[in-house]
Every structure is written in structure tokens, then in C-alpha cells.
Image (spheres, rainbow, N blue to C red):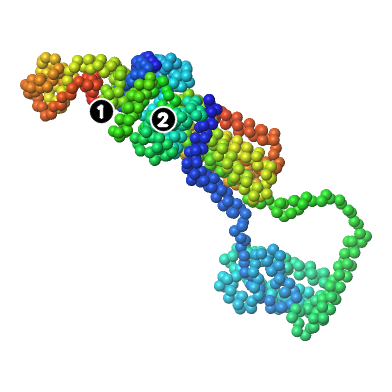
Amino acid sequence: MIEVEEVRKRYGEFAAVDGVSFAAGEGTVFGLLGPNGAGKSTTIGCISGLLAPSSGRVRVCGHDVVREARRARACIGVVPQELALYEDLNAADNVRYWGAAYGMRGRELERRVGEVLELTGLADRSRQAVKKLSGGMKRRLNFGCGIVHRPRVLLLDEPTVGVDPQSRVRLLDMVREQAESGTCVLYTTHYMEEAQELCDRLAIMDHGRILAAGTLEELRALLGERDLVRVTGEFEPERIRHGIEALDDTEVVNIDSGAMLIAAGAASRRLPAIFAAVTEAGGRVDETTLNRPNLESLFIKLTGRELRG
Amino acid sequence: MSVHFAIITAKKDLRRRLADPAALLIWLALPLAIGSLLVLINSGDGGAPRGRLLVVDEDRSFVSGVIAAIPARGEMAELFDVVHVEHAEGRRLIDADEATALLILPAGLQGAFVGKGNAEIRLVTNPSHRILPSVIEEAMSIAADFAVYSERLLGPAAPHFADMRLDDATASPSDIEESLSQLVRRLNSRLLESGKRVLAPPVLSVELAPAPDESESSGESAVPDIGRIFLPGMIFLSVLFVAQGMSGDVWNERRLGTLHRVACSPPSMAAFLAGKLLAGTSVAALVAVIGVAAGIVLFDLSLSRAPLAVLWVAFSGCVMLVYFVLLQCLASSQRAGDMLSNLVLFPVLMLGGSFFPFQMMPDWMAEIGRWTPNGAALIRLGEILDAQPDFPAMALAALAIGVPAAVAFALATRRLSGRFLVS
């Protein structure tokens, strides 16, 4: 349903997206995971037709998004990162307008408007001006406007940013329902938990490139089931690296004079050896954190930095 | 689908406007308020200045009575309150700044009038008043001229006339009547003798002239109502405010994120913009309906002119909106867009006859104004309201403002889909 081949988007010398390729099929949720500025929104922009790729090709439902823009757009639903609603219209009017924009009319449109308002839990607020709705309600309505025309491909660009936990759970449920009904969902986020919880396949992005892609299991395997140990204190980087890497199944991912990140198999049992190596190398340990393997640890391993912050 | 999308976009925009009726009312009421003020300023309905003229009649004669009556008759009566006072009271009032002028008609005035001695009429004016004392001076100057010519006209009747007094206690009413009758008879015969040289033999020529149109002969129609002159300009003032105000909505659409959603949907940006123009055209038509209805009620405009006038204003409003949308799209921010459109709005308002009618402008300025888009459209509206639509000129004006508007539409669409959307 979505085929992205070697897509690049350049702004002068800066490459916002740099040779991205992936494919997503019917009834699946494909996640694009990465920090702010990784190129996720630009990738979505190229797929939705909002931005013209500098090179490469994007096909949606078999239609080239540049050459057959209108056909491609007709099968895409977009839920943008920022709200895209008319604040002075009511909820029903917003849904109705976007349904009509996709060619829906008459009874079909009215029926669908009712369904979407029901689905988003806004049926009892349908006559209320959007500006009077809560932030979470607006997010749900934003989602509703993106699915009113029953798109075969749904693009969601960080739809849960700034959403209260209750609305977030509701939104994630709605995304799952869309996928279960056969829609191909492309979901961008910088929340690891969401990606782990929701996505069938994932691509980890940073600096406009895909660093790793696959199912959650495939990505975990890349990490080698090793835990991540973050140690803060005072270190002499080269001496410490030498001492730590002398230990079995242990690797220093990143180190500077105040913090060190170590990937180690069964790290909880290796902590005494790690502390001893640090002490021997003339270092001092102030604080230690141990993480079980997950997407975040994979991201840290791939990029050398945490996803948040 | 594009037409359908344009229509639903127009409906959506009109709903949004109705959701904020205050802004809509301001668009309609602001030009109305400005226009009404301009009409008031230019109509002079604020009332003419009125002065107080003090008259000291020391002669109490027929002539002094006539002179004292000059400022109290005809159009001068609208300018002056004439008050008869004693000399001392008159001086006190003029010194106290409680009068415009003091006219002193001395004893012996009537005798001097017919050549028996000299008399001097004195006029003391209030230096803090500027215009009205000049009016009195001018009137007295005319009275003096009249005295000179009257002396020549009266001739032998003068001595008898010099003895006439208005309050002669010794004379009975029949004596005065007899005296006046004799005077008039002598004047008549003298006038006839003098006139015979000119009138005999009488030469008469008859010229047949068409009867004047009743409407032209009536004072009201000959001088058009000032409000009627301002009406087309006021309608366009409102239309331009609407066009400028609604053009900024492209920035609102961008801020709301809805423009991005439109760009990702199948309909073209041209259809979206067409919808916005359709909404603007509808509001302009509403303005025209209100304006023309006011014209019908207040200035007796013919109802038959209304449809064409409304259509013309709606078309012109659409054109103005396209121009303003292009300006907004070319700006780097909403604030810059507002500034740019205001920079254009006010000069074209002033020059294009929307603030001051072309009839009240200097010729050179009116000539420039007629070449502005709103000026060209306004002239045609004036002709429609005057029931003298010049259809070839209208077609030409429609082309002159419509073709650049079509180009502006294409440029604005391109800009909305490109740099405006993603910058």
C-alpha cells in the first residue's frame, strides 16, 4: 500500500530526508520512530503529497504521489501533528466538511459523520464549537476528520503529542481499529512505549536516515539481548574503555568524562566486575541505571544518545 | 468535484463568518459610519453661523427703516438676528462681545439720501467675528450705491420724499398715504419718461423654449442630495473593507493547519481559493443589497436598477478580494500581509472615490482615481444607480479589472500550493 523508494528531500545543502526506503502493507501499523528533527514529518509530507520529494519515488495504493497525485490523495487520510480544525465551526461541521472534500455527499456523508463522531466519543458534543472542546477532544476530532472518508492508507504524525492519558489510550485504540479494518497505518512517534505497543513493523530514523527497520523482535535481536548500563561519575575515557571491554560480552557504547553507556549481557550479574574495572582505571562511580533491552536501548545503541531530551 | 468543493468551501467560510457576527457587522458598519460622517461634514447640516446685528436708528425715517430692514429680510435673515437698541446699549453689547456688529443710522440720514446735507452710516464690527461682519459691510455698501442712484431717480420728488417720516405724530394716516401716493406717481412718470427713450418704439422678439423638465425645475433634483453622491463610494468602501478583511483568512487557514489538510486532499487549491472567493462575493453582494436598499429608501432610486447594481458590486468585490489574497500570499507573515494590504487599501480608497466622490476631488486626482480598480468599478456603479448604465463601458471595465484578477488568481493559487504552504 505504501512503497517508499530512496526518497530524498533537500532544502539547499540540508537533507531533511536522505535516501529513505520502506514498504507497509494492508492492515498493518508501520511505525517511524525517532527524535524531533529526525525527518519523520518530512517523510510523511512526501507521502501525503504535501511536499515534493527531491528524488526517489513514493507510491500509495499503486499510484505515484507526484504523477497521479489526485488518485493517490483520494486513498490517503492524514492526521497531522498540529490540529487542523476550524475552531469556530462545530465538531459535526468539521467532520462533514472534510468528508465532502473527499467527494462524500448526502445521506452517505451524514451517516458517516454520525459514525465518526460516535467512534471518537464526540457524538454528544457534535453541536459544540471546536474552540470549546478540551485538548483531548480536539485530538480525537482531528483523528476523526482524517478517517471520515474511510481511507485505505492512514498517515498519523505524532497524534498523541500533548494528549492526556485517557484520550491517548482512546486514540491508540482507534488506530488499532483502523488497522484491524484493513487500513495501512503509518504512525510516527518519539514515544518508545507507543511504538512497542502499537506497531507491527518499525523503522528507527535519525538525521533523515533509517538506522534500522523490522519487526519489534527483529530489532531486539539487533541489540543482542544485551542490557544497557548507564554509569555517571568521573572517568578517564580511554583507560576505562580499555578496562571495561576486557570483560566478557561487554561493550562501551558511549563515554565521556562524566557518563558512560555500556551494553552487557546479563548486566546485573556483571555490575561488581564493571565497578572494579572503573576503580582500577582510576575512575569514580556516582550513579548507575540498568535498562532491559527495548526500543529505547536499541535507539541509544544505534545513535549513542537517548531518544528524549 | 472541484465545483462541489468550491461551493462547500464557500458555505463553510460563510458559516465561519456567521459564527463571528461582530466582525461581520464591523465590516458593514464601519464604512457606514465613516460615510455618514463624511456626508455630514460635506452637507453643512451642522448649521450655518448666525450673528447678532445691533441697529441704532437715530433718524427714525422711512429710509433708515428700509436700511435697518435689509439684514432682516431674505437670505440675510438666515444669518442675522437684528436687534434695535439705543446707542449706549449698543456700544456696551459690542464691547462685551455679545454682538457681531453695531449699525448706527444717524439723524438726517433720509435728508442726506435725497441730497439735503450729509450723513454718515457707521458700522462697528466685532473683531472676534470674521465672516459675518464682512457680510454686513457688503450689504451696507450696496445700500450706499442704491442711495446714489435713488437720488438721481427721484429728482424733483426728492424734497417731498425728504420730509416723509415713519412716526410723524402730526400727520394723519391719510396724509402719509397721500404723500406716498404722490411720490409713487411722480416716480412712475419719471421712470416712463426716462424709459421711453429705450422702450419706444418697442421691439419685441419671441423665442419659443421647450418647457423645462419638472424634475429639473425642482430645487431638490437640480442639486443632488449629498448622501446620494456619496452612496456608491460608501458601498465600495464597505466592499473594500470586506475584501481586505477576508483576504487575511488564508493566513488563518495556514495557522489552523487546515490549509495543509486541503493540500493533502484530492481537490485542487484553485477550487479551494475559488470557494473562498465565492464566500467573499456573497458578502459583497450582501453589502450591495444593503447599500442599494438604503438608496431606494433614502434617495428614491429605482428598484429596477438594484439587480444590476448588486451584480456589479458582487463582481467588483470578488475582483478586489483576489487582489488582496495575492498580496497576503506574497507577504512573509500574517502581520506583514495585513500591513501590505492596508498600505494598498487606504490609498486606493482615497484615490478611487470611496472616501471622497470624484466630483469633490481636484481634477488631476480624480483622473488618477478613475484608473484604480475600485475607481473604474465605482464609476460604472454610479452610472447604474443614475439609471444610465453604459454597457460597452461596463464590459470594458469588467475586462480591465477582471483579466488582471484572473492572473492574480493563478498566481495566488500557485503561491498557496507552494511556498506559502510550507515556508
Q: Secondary structure at mark 1?
A: loop
Tell me, for residue A116, which label it has, or none.
2
CA gap between label 1 and label 2 equals: 33 Å
- For the point 75% across and 78% down, the residue is B166
- Evaluate whether label 1 is on the same chain as label 2: yes
Residue placed furthest toward the bottom: B170
Q: Is residue B198 left or right of residue A114?
A: right
Chain of the residue on which disc 2 is drawn: A
Tell me, for residue B61, which label it has, or none.
none
The amino acid beneath tag 1 is: Arg
Residue B88 placement (x, y as % from top left)? 61, 78
- For the point 71% across and 51% down, the residue is B221
Displayed quadrant of residue A42: top left
Residue B281 placement (x, y as % from top left)? 56, 36
Chain of the residue on which disc 1 is drawn: A
Residue A237 placement (x, y as % from top left)? 14, 22
Residue pointed to by mark 1: A308
Label 1 Cα neighbours within 10 Å, binned few <14 / some 14-19 / many ≥20: few
The amino acid beneath tag 2 is: Val
Query: Answer yes or no: do the residues labelled 1 and 2 have beta carbons within 8 Å?
Result: no
Residue B255 placement (x, y as % from top left)? 42, 34
